[in-house]
Image (tube, rainbow, N blue to C red):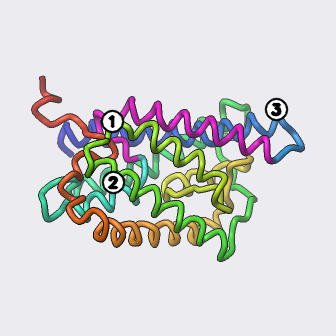
């Protein structure tokens, strides 16, 4: 692994870990502060997640692009491969490993901060066609958003736009919009408000991958040259020359 790739992978690890820490930690806090009111708990969880995501994109975007999501990274590789932009296959592999391991670490960190066992399998079943459909919609919308912003030169709006989308999708999807295979896997390691049972993970991940494929089709129709801007997803990151200075 080159120094540049190691730096970017470490940013993806840390960013995804902190994102999951925000999701799980705010879920635990919400359940403790607002017991008996699930709607208020979800609102608190959604607001904290949306704000944290925007801040994390600003922090890690210049280093790695702040994907924090294997579907975003995979679409970035797919669309950019012909134009010579975006992730290479080796970068995609490194990003995916970093994101998944980071997500698990984020759950462990949140559990420990709230004096819970470091890791505990979630017992919250999340399964059914309606939830899988919701994950497909949430993921497709997220991917189209970040590539549309990049293609139209508005990547600077990504922290606010992506945070807003995720916060809203908590409410307009029946699944509360995981929209991210790494985050889904990470949330299986916490038996708290934000958890998902391990047996429910494959269905969510499959739906998210379908959402990524739908996003590719939508981008081909609406933004046929989206791959030209793959280097600016989610926001532009430093070139090797700039990093070396």
Residue 60 located within the stretch drawn in magenta: yes
Report how far apart the C-alphas of labels 2 and 1 lie in the structure.
Answer: 12 Å
Q: Quadrant of residue 66?
A: top left
Camera-side residue: 113 or 65?
A: 65
The mark that comes first in sequence, 2 or 1, is 2
Q: Mark 1 = which residue?
A: 156
Which residue corresponds to the image point at 25% horizontal and 37% vertical from the top-left? 237
Tell me the magenta residue range.
39-67
Camera-side residue: 204 or 215?
A: 215
Residue neighbourhood size for the residue with mark 3, other residues' Cα within 10 Å, grouped as few (<14), some (14–19), many (≥20): few
Residue neighbourhood size for the residue with mark 2, other residues' Cα within 10 Å, grouped as few (<14), some (14–19), many (≥20): some
Q: Nearer the viewer, mark 1 or mark 3?
A: 1
Camera-side residue: 112 or 43?
A: 43
Relative to 67, does residue 7 appear above or below in the rendering?
Answer: above
Residue 30 located within the stretch drawn in magenta: no
Q: Mark 3 = which residue?
A: 33
Residue 112 x %, y % = 66, 33
As helix, strand or loop, the secondary structure at mark 2 comes to helix
As helix, strand or loop, the secondary structure at mark 1 comes to helix
Q: In this view, does 65 lie to the left or right of 116?
A: left
Q: In which quarter of the image is residue 12?
A: top left
Residue 198 x %, y % = 64, 63
Q: Mark 2 = which residue?
A: 148
- In the displayed image of the protein, which residue is found farthest to the left? 241
Residue 152 x %, y % = 27, 49
Report how far apart the C-alphas of labels 1 and 3 lie in the structure.
Answer: 35 Å
Which residue corresponds to the image point at 52% horizontal and 71% vertical from the top-left? 207
The mark that comes first in sequence, 1 or 3, is 3
């Amino acid at each position: 692994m080159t120094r540049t790739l190691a730096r970017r992978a470490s940013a993806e690890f840390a960013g995804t870990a902190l994102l999951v820490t925000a999701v799980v930690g705010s879920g635990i806090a919400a359940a403790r502060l607002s017991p008996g009111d699930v709607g208020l708990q979800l609102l608190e969880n959604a607001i904290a997640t949306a704000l944290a995501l925007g801040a994390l994109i600003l922090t890690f975007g210049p280093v790695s692009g702040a994907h924090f999501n294997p579907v975003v990274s995979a679409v970035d590789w797919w669309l950019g491969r012909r134009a010579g932009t975006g992730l290479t296959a080796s970068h995609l592999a490194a990003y995916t490993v970093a994101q998944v391991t980071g997500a698990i670490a984020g759950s462990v960190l949140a559990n420990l901060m709230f004096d819970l066992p470091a890791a505990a399998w979630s017992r919250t079943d999340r399964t059914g066609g309606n939830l899988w459909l919701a994950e497909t919609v949430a993921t497709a919308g997220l991917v189209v958003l970040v590539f549309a912003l990049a293609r139209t030169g508005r990547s600077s709006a990504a922290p606010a736009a992506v945070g807003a989308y995720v916060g809203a999708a908590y409410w307009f999807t029946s699944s509360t919009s995981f929209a991210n295979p790494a985050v889904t896997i990470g949330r299986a390691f916490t038996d708290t408000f934000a958890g998902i049972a391990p047996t429910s993970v494959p269905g969510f991940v499959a739906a998210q991958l379908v959402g990524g494929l739908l996003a590719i089709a939508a981008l081909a129709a609406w933004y046929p040259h989206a791959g030209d801007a793959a280097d600016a997803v989610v926001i532009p990151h430093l070139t090797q020359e700039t990093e070396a200075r």
